[in-house]
Image: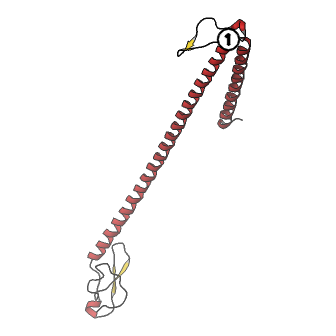
Amino acid sequence: MFTEHHTVGLEATMLILLGLVLLLAAVVVGVVGVLTNGGEEHTITDGFSVFGYEVTGSTGTLFLYGIVVGAVGLLGLALLMSGARRSSRRTRTARREAKDARKEAAKAQKDRDRIAEQNSTLVSDANTARTTPATDTASTTGTAPTTGTTPSGTTSPTDTTSHGAHQRGARYTGEERP
């Protein structure tokens, strides 16, 4: 009934709810700790200093300072983790794009190889057709050009009056050249 997508969504919702409950509990403990440890009866009597600064006041004030330091540390850790996650996501995306680009390049190379092979086959067939002697009745009878048979079995016009233009790759137009 539940798909993997629903399970992941349910897990994320549970983690968010658990985080909110823990955050609320921490706020309640902090407020109670500061309020119940204030006043003259909870004064810091022994010397307490941080980086050379003498901390005075009640134990509730000291507890509040601890909460502030903890929150700043937690914020720094959250920023660090967020930056690492973003960097990891970018790296993953770049790897995926590079992999896709390599696949596309390989496909393009296969296409180029296939086309080059077809081209060389066509050139080879054309060279074979040029070197194969055609049946030529025009030179002996003086009539119109005839057709010769290529190695592939098709017929192609052979013009003996074009002074070798057909052999140089010119097309037969049916007109005799001077």
**Is 94 placed left or right of 63 in the picture?**
left
Tell me which corner region of the image, top left, top right, bottom left or bottom right, holds residue 58: top right
Relative to 23, say whether 153 is above or below: below
Residue topped by disc 1 = 58
Q: Which residue lies furthest to the bottom in this view?
A: 142
Relative to 123, say whether 65 is above or below: above
Relative to 36, say whether 129 is above or below: below
Which quarter of the image is occupied by the N terminus? top right
- In the rendered image, residue 15, in percent from the top left (x then y), is placed at 67, 28
- In the rendered image, residue 113, in percent from the top left (x then y), is placed at 37, 58
Along the line of sight, the residue nearer the viewer: 4 or 175: 4
Along the line of sight, the residue nearer the viewer: 56 or 104: 56
- In the rendered image, residue 47, in percent from the top left (x then y), is placed at 58, 7
Which residue occupies 29% across, 87% down?
A: 162
Along the line of sight, the residue nearer the viewer: 118 or 7: 7
Which residue occupies 63% across, 12% down?
A: 56
Which residue occupies 64% across, 8% down?
A: 44
Tell me which corner region of the image, top left, top right, bottom left or bottom right, holds residue 12: top right
